[in-house]
Image (cartoon, rainbow, N blue to C red):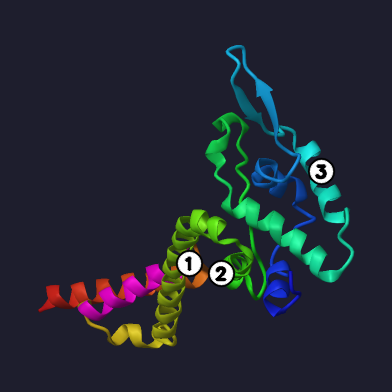
Amino acid sequence: MKVDERALKLLSSVSVTGELGELAMRGARYGLPGWVTESTQRNGTTKPVYIDQRTEAERRAGEYLAGGAHRGGEIVGRQIALLAMAAYADQQAVAASNRSWHHVRYSGPWAADADGLLDELVAEKLTEPAAGLLAPTLQERKRDREQRAGERQAREDALARLQGIEQRIPELDADELAGVAQDVELAWAGWDPRQSELRQLLRARRNALSDQQDGD
């Protein structure tokens, strides 16, 4: 794997070695050569057997990273391979009781771009048959990214409209208050002190308008 800006941003956004066991259980145990064995059933059929112990998966993943990876491109490539398998693996390959519920988590300044960077880097390395098999997954991930990007933009737009709103609320009418209330709910996913303060101000303004109407 070429050690370029995309690879560095991706690997700066996730702790591969810090979550090695979880990543391996999420993906590598399903496909790295030698990790999957076969068990013969009483009827003569065979079925794949996957690693079911996190410590064993972590040990093998450590050997995979260190074994034969000496140059920068090899070290980066193997980390990205573990990430890709964790991101794309179908967890329905095993019973629910043996699935990994770990999710690849990104943080830092490039976290929002990390999923797209992973897909881009992996797609460049896929053979044509593999690209065809993975295409539905990549398309679904792209749609999810576009939806999340739209939601982030909507929150940013709402926050921009709420700049200085505290001073304007006492002059707003009922319709304008409704629009501000929508922005308040959109701007913060969870509880926030400013959100709570704005709700109180909106409630006070509504009460004032109601009292004014009753007086009229």
Quarter in which the C terminus is drawn:
bottom left
Callout 3 environment at 10 Å: few (<14), some (14 to 19), or many (20+)? many
Q: Amino acid at mark 2?
A: Gly
Residue 1 % position (x, y): 74, 69
* Distance from Cα at disc 2 to Cα at disc 3: 27 Å
**In the rendered structure, does residue 176 fall within the stretch colored magenta?**
yes
Dot 1 lies on which element? helix
Q: Is residue 67 left or right of residue 189?
A: right
Q: Is residue 158 above or below residue 138?
A: below
Q: Position of residue 76 (x, y in %)?
A: 77, 66
Q: Tags 1 and 2 in contact by the CB under 8 Å rule?
A: yes
> Looking at the image, do the residues carrying marks 1 and 3 touch, with CB atoms under 8 Å apart?
no
Query: In the picture, residue 8 is in which quadrant?
Result: bottom right
Q: Residue at x 77, y 40 (%)?
A: 57
Determine if residue 164 is in view. Answer: yes
Residue 72: within the magenta? no
> On residue 116, which mark appears?
2
Asked whether, in this view, residue 1 is left or right of residue 87, the answer is right
What are the residue bounds of the magenta stretch? 175-189
Where residue 198 is drawn, which disc sits there?
A: none
Foreground residue, 194 or 71?
Answer: 71
Q: Is residue 160 above or below residue 130?
A: below
Residue 60 tag number: 3
Query: In which quadrant of the rendered view does residue 171 lie?
Result: bottom left
Q: Amino acid at mark 3?
A: Arg
Q: Earlier in the sequence, mark 2 or mark 3?
A: 3
Place of residue 92 in the rendered image (x, y in percent of width and height, measured from the top left)? 53, 38
